[in-house]
Image: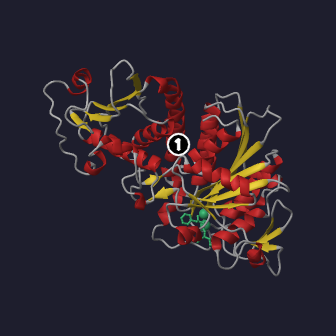
Amino acid sequence: MQIPQILSLADLQVDRNFAVIRCGEQLFGLEEGALSAELYAQWVGSSQSFEARGLKGIETVLHQAERFLLPLDQSKGLDALEHVRLTAAKLFKHAVARKSPDLSFAFSSLSIEQLGALLDGLFYAQYRFDLYKSKKESPVLPEIFVYLPQELLAEAKTLVDEKLILAQSTAQIRDFVNTPGGDLVPSDYAERIAELFASDPQVQVEILDEVQLEAQGYMGLITVGRGSQNPPRMVSISYNAQLNDGEHLGFVGKGMTFDAGGISIKPATGMWEMRMDMAGSAAVVGAMLAISRLKLPVRVSAVVVLAENRPGENACLPGDIFKAKNGKTVMVDNTDAEGRLVLSDGLFKVGEMGATTLVDLATLTGAIIRAIGTSIAGLFSNDRSLECELLEAGKLHGEKMWPMPLDLEYRDSLDDKVADMKNIGGDAGAVTAALFLQEFIPENAKWAHLDIAGTAFCTKDWKYYGAGGTGWGVRTLVQWAKNKSGGLK
Ligand code: BES
Ligand code: ZN
Ligand code: ZN
């Protein structure tokens, strides 16, 4: 990741509002006579014409650089900040394609949120995953300059540091999501998570292996992991454990390093995508990384539940019954509904760690995709204010969520004739999955569940994300934690 160099505009005599974007020798958003001779000379040089050339693909966006800050077409459902991210990402890719030595932005006025979105777009466009390509491309990356009004500079510098931390933390966990299941089994994944936090004295990491898990009764993980030679792990991450007053936030993430469905095996087509079934855990790890690197003054505990769901010799059979952490017996009706089983252990554990406001992220159901597609995450919560806080945090970062019902009318579809509960209900699969999770929430705890099955991974480029893991949720969680820690902006 590069660090944009932020320079001041203040010493240049600018007598009108303007926005300029320069990509090597290309200049966007200028009209003849719009700039003073001095600024013109600095930005354009004497021989350069104003004509913008070779703008294929981005011409509409760059016709007038002021438009950079505004959504061109709100009917596309992107708000102004998302438009800035998208345009910045397109510009970055354009500059790389042209092998431009620099990409510069100058704004005579800009809000801090707009600057944040600009940085997001630039940083997110830089992410690539080429670990498995034998021939690696090493494109020439442009140097980035952002010229801003003097009064914004101090805040802008802090923002650049913060956005970099966010982007780097997200890039690290997108690598996890993009790594094939066979190369990131639960034990390796757990070790790699621990390594990420090893040098931070404010963070403690605990890994429970399969023997400890069984001894402590985490039978959701044990039951799901039984079909695999690669046993499950539970990783607990505790940040700022010494903070005893204030809210104690808890994150939980589903970490199925591969979900073949178990004995209720999935169809072959597209099954490879289930390497991403650990994206909830990855987002939680990314958020913890960013929160700890930003040193947010808030207490956060996180639990990620890691397992591999395979049809193996010893795999859990449909109809098997185990005793879950809430004391209830659960009949496994469909072994492919495994996420809720491992999350039951994670939710219980984070409650035991003392967290009182819980958020879990999970690629939990195909049903959420059928309900609201792949651009929006399903948000289920037992607390309206928590729901609003998350929606607001997500909105600032272009991470869309939609409130879904946790309606108890569907709860009895989870009743079983032999056991206390079963793991699948009737219709409304995303709702019954959430109702299953609700059984494991500590009394009086606030809780929200984000079903990110649609948003966590894209098979082709989407917005400013390349195909693959999107890192969806890191920014929402970090923003939410930041708002909780006293509203740093
Ligand atoms: N990991 C899947 C859900 C999923 C589907 C994630 C598509 C990402 C994209 C989950 O474990 C699963 O298999 N759910 C089943 C539940 C069903 C058996 C009740 C599903 O949604 O089909
Ligand atoms: Zn499954
Ligand atoms: Zn799954």
Q: Position of residue 314 (x, y in %)?
A: 68, 66
Quick check: which quadrant has ligand 3?
Answer: bottom right
- Percent position (x, y) of residue 132? 40, 47
The kind of residue tagged 1 is Thr
Above or below 398: residue 16: above
Q: Is residue 87 visible?
A: yes
Report the quarter where the N terminus lies.
top left
Q: Residue furthest top?
A: 11
Q: Which residue is mark 1?
A: 170
Q: Is residue 39 left or right of residue 444?
A: left
Residue in the image at 64% along x and 28% along y = 199
Q: Nearer the viewer, residue 51 or 309?
A: 51
Q: Check the image and report above or below for 84 versus 15.
A: below
Residue positioned most to the left: 47
Residue 305 visible from this viewpoint: no
Residue in the foreground of this view, choosing between 323 and 375: 375
- Is 459 left or right of 247, judged from the image as shown? left
Query: In the displayed image of the protein, which residue is found farthest to the bottom?
Result: 417
